[in-house]
Image: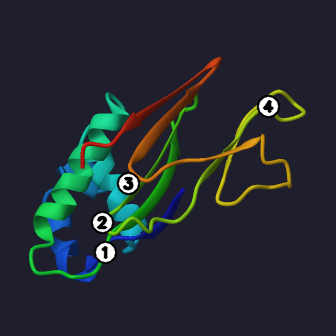
Amino acid sequence: MHNGQIGGFQAIKRQLEADLPDEIYSIRQGSTDSEMFFLTLLANRLNDDPLEAVNRSIEKIRSLQVGINQPNRITCALSDGHSIYAFRYSSDEKSPSLYLGKDLDSGGSVLASEPLDESPDRWHKIGEMDFIEISEGARTTTRLAA
């Protein structure tokens, strides 16, 4: 899930494409910033170290945005089937919202762009620049380096 935008994406899209390894470029199907961001994450070893892949991908994008005055506003959630990784990042502190719902009736957790009910004790807003990992029985939050 990606909500938001990469500032000046059309101006840096070709450079991002050129940096993709052939095996990742070959799976490209569309032309959106969401897909390009995901492919960039894969190129930066998302499967091995999700936090480092996010930090490296954001840094790569920022390095290409010289002279671009449009903000990055990125809220993402990713899963490998065992853990969920989610984060908020923006260059102007206005990324789309993301909430973690805890202690639900089922005992589970949920990520949502807005709280799904009026129970303020259940909903925790993920902070700007926060990276959260949710695994069975554990939740950790780390600050992004970008």
Residue type, label 1: Pro
Local crowd size for mark 3, using a 10 Å CA cut-off: few (<14), some (14–19), many (≥20): some
Residue drawn at 39 percent across, 64 percent down: 93
Work out whether mark 1 precedes mark 3 in sequence or the reverse, and give the earlier one.
Answer: 3
Work out whether mark 3 precedes mark 4 in sequence or the reverse, and give the earlier one.
Answer: 3
Report how far apart the C-alphas of labels 3 and 4 lie in the structure. 30 Å
Give 98 or 21, whichever is nearer the viewer.
98
Residue drawn at 17 percent across, 56 percent down: 60
Placement of the N terminus among the 4 image quadrants: bottom right
Residue 142, position in %: x, y? Answer: 40, 33
Residue 101, position in %: x, y? Answer: 72, 42
Q: Secondary structure at mark 4?
A: loop
Residue drawn at 17 percent across, 80 percent down: 68
Q: Which mark is residue 91?
A: 2
Report how far apart the C-alphas of labels 2 and 3 lie in the structure. 19 Å
> Which residue is denoted by mark 3 in the rendering?
38
Work out whether mark 2 precedes mark 3 in sequence or the reverse, and give the earlier one.
Answer: 3
> Which residue is denoted by mark 1 in the rendering?
71
> Which residue is denoted by mark 4 in the rendering?
103
